[in-house]
Image (cartoon, rainbow, N blue to C red):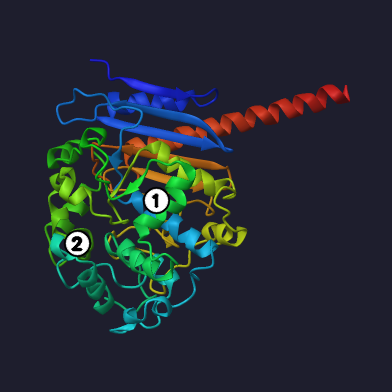
Amino acid sequence: MQVPIFGYAKDGFEEVKTTFEENFKYRHEVGASCCVYYKGKKVVDLWGGYRDKNKKLYWEEDTLCIAFSTTKGMSSLAFALLHSKGLIDYDEKVATYWPEFAYNGKENITIRQLLAHQAGLFSNDKKLSYEVLTNEAELSDCLAKQKPYWKPGDEQGYHAWTIAMYQNEICKRVDPLKKTLAQFYKSEIADALGIDFHIGLPDNIPLHRVAHLFPFFPTEALNGGNSDFGAIMRGILNPFSTFYKSLLNPPFALNLNNFNKRKYMALPIGSALGYGNARSIAQSYNEFVMGGRNLRIKRETLNLLEAAPIYPKKGREDVVLHVDIPFSLGFAKPSTYQNFGANYRSYGTFGAGGSGGFADPEKQVAFGYIMNKMGTHIANDPRELALRKAVYECIFEIEQKKITEVVTQVSNTSI
């Protein structure tokens, strides 16, 4: 049966649409969307497949989907705006804004170290149950009292859930109106730019607009050739591992089907519980790629986002993910393991199961991809990777064509 595909790819980007279609034919896609901006113009806006559990309802233009850690990018764009407004300094100590944070050896941790996942706060000694997550005072106290797992700055360990919890506490303390991180993103970025992305699913959005999440199955990974499933399972099956402590606290995350339950979908946690589509992700990054004129982002802030990452003292391998994915100011940066964008100036985040979004200031590209069928890669999901490569192959061809045209013009003029 033919899978329904909607949207468009403009002249020069047809290969991206072909790749999007191939994801459904050969890479087990169920429902997805992909969007690309190039030099400020939307050149790809595709959606297709199915959004419901029974695969009968088409993925629509406004269908939303859980973004998992791709949400971290939206949260960190909000933090960049805080910086641009002069409300935070990346090199200032967290305790300057949040005095209680200084407890238990955290008095010298800077915001930069925290956002680079180098603070040693990748988990919490307390189980972050639903009851704790919905008790603002208790959660704040848990975060403030947590002792770092290593000397801050020595190691990098992916703060899978806790990173945006800390960002949220800082945001509440520096925003003049005491907005939470979710509220700040909504009012200052989403509403300001007309972006349909939400940190925590709002009550007024009906569930039929949200794509059903299809968790991965072990048999898919075993039959799918190259994947990170082995490493993932070793982490999941060992409750003492850094992987387990980081990714599976809150405990509800152990059952991926919980992410289809409104109770958990509504939690405004900017680490993973963002809901949007590829268009909203790409549109957010495009604002920053194009200089942040609408949001009045200062050039100083953009320069910091585009700077090379500062690695921890004791090596480049992340002690939670066990791969080389450097982080800077809340964003992943390109590496040999995950080489996105044109160069080190690029920044973005990628989510569990395959989603991703990033900004490439060098080529002026903003990219977004989201899907409801989870894959089994820590990063570089074959569907996202294929689309990402197709985008840059198209740009290469466009640039080569322009060079040829210029050379031909010069040659004709000389004659």
Seen at 49% across and 47% down, the residue is 359
Which part of the image, by quadrant, shows the C terminus? Answer: top right
Circle 1 SS class? helix
Seen at 28% across and 39% down, the residue is 65
Sooner in the amino-acid sequence: mark 2 or mark 1: 2
Q: Is residue 337 above or below residue 330?
A: above
Q: Which mark is residue 134?
A: 2
Residue position for label 1: 186
Q: Is residue 171 above or below residue 200?
A: below
**Residue 328 shows in this picture:** yes
Which part of the image, by quadrant, shows the N terminus? Answer: top left
Three-letter amino acid code at the position of disc 1: Lys
Left or right of 374 in this view: 47: right
Q: Is residue 179 above or below residue 149?
A: above
Residue lying at the far top of the rendered structure: 1
Residue 288 picture location, percent across and down: 53, 49
Three-letter amino acid code at the position of disc 2: Thr
Q: For the residues marked 2 and 1, what is the alpha-carbon distance in whole angstroms?
A: 20 Å
Residue 37 picture location, percent across and down: 51, 36
